[in-house]
Amino acid sequence: MRVAVILSIVWTLGAGLGASQALAQQTSAGPVDVTAEVENLDTPWAFDFLPDGGLLITERAGTLLHVAPDGTRTSVSGVPEVAARGQGGLLDITLGRDFEQSRRVFMTYAKPQGGRGAGTALASATLSADAQSLSNLKLLFEMKPGNRGGAHFGSRVVEAEDGTLFVTVGERQQPDLAQDLSEHNGTVVRVTRDGNVPADNPFVGQQGALPHIWSYGHRNPQGAALDARGRLWVNEHGARGGDEVNLIEKGANYGWPVISYGRQYSGGKIGVGTEREGMKQPAHYWDPSIAPSGMMFYEGDMFPDWQGDMFVGALKFDYISRLEVDGDDATEVEQIKLPQTARVRDIQVAPDGSIWFLAVADGTLYRMAR
């Protein structure tokens, strides 16, 4: 477990250019150009690349946008009903590994659960050949009802190499439930592509435990990604300080709210301190908090110096964090802070090796390239 160390400063080489123009910037990998690819988005949350060069982008209010290679954008019909309030709404989207054959996509969202209740949910659907509609919508998972309020939904979906699906679930501002295996709050869950519980999940058959749970003791995990070895990493929001990156292990307890490197917003102590037997330590933590969100591991040819590094978007302080991974530890080694990196919600590697990121502050999807 390592604490943040900032090793580089980013200088602006250009200013005052139009949003659609490339703006040269300096990074540890050399100068980069940052170009606005899709603008005027309404609270965007996630995106993914289509094989034909198009894009799918979620907007939290409940719109799924298709952006064609020529820039034409349309709203995709057939999206599930969402509870669009607070931090809830239409959240993550990812294409299935077999998308070119199945055209299957996976979405996470805040699902209405009666009255003012809402819970993190996962659905799959088939995207039409013209990318204008969803069909065969199927609910694969939803957290147990009983959660009100509009905060701490998570939520990312990652398809593992074996085809199972990991979904991050926030504790819905009910901290103690993150230690309760009879609740989904504050967990990473794992289901099959059909929504069934895999037989090798760690709590299958354990009395009083929900079988979907893969790990627990999380606060508000808003980023998740697989590394080159297929290992799942998750980042999560702490309270005041104590945002974390965790390497997720089967059945492990990540401690919230018993241990934390942060403090209550009032300044008070959280739980018993920073460690307790049987609870995992973070691979990295930030203090002060950066409000981490989307994350990815760089595997591409455009930035060979960054090969295998972890990238995390910061909703606070407006930068992209680059972390080097050494075994089970991660260390922040660079803050890529550009005029465009204002509240970075999602970040992905494009097929050509460029890095794309969603900036919520100005509702723009940017491309960073050399």
Image (cartoon, grey):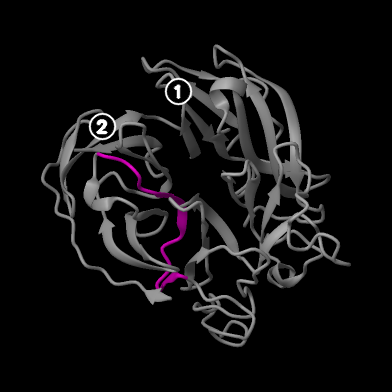
Check disc 1 and report the residue beneath it: 51
Instruction: Please give the name of the residue rendered at 73% of the width and 62% of the height, measured from the top-left corner.
Output: 202
| Quarter occupied by the C terminus | top left
Q: Give the residue type that dot 1 points to.
A: Pro
Q: Is residue 112 above or below residue 40?
A: below
Depth order, front residue of 268/143: 143
Question: Residue furthest toward the right?
Answer: 207
| Secondary structure of residue under mark 1 | loop
**Residue identifier under label 2:** 19
User: Foreground: 84 or 287?
Assistant: 287
> Residue 68 location, x and y as percent?
43, 17
Tell me which residue sits at (62%, 17%) in the image: 133
Instruction: Compare residues 182 and 239 and report the one nearer the observer.
Output: 182
Determine the secondary structure under disc 2. loop
Mark in the foreground, 1 or 2: 1
Magenta-drawn segment:
283-301
Q: Quadrant of the N terminus?
A: bottom left
Whether the residues at callouts 1 and 2 have beta carbons within 8 Å, the answer is no
Location of residue 72 in the rendering, given as x and y in whole percent from the top left corner: 42, 15
Give the residue at x 52% y 79%: 263
Quarter where residue 208 is shown: bottom right
363, 66: nearer the viewer: 66
Q: Which mark is residue 84?
A: none
Q: Is residue 236 left or right of residue 14?
A: right
Q: Could you tell me if residue 241 is visible in this image?
A: yes
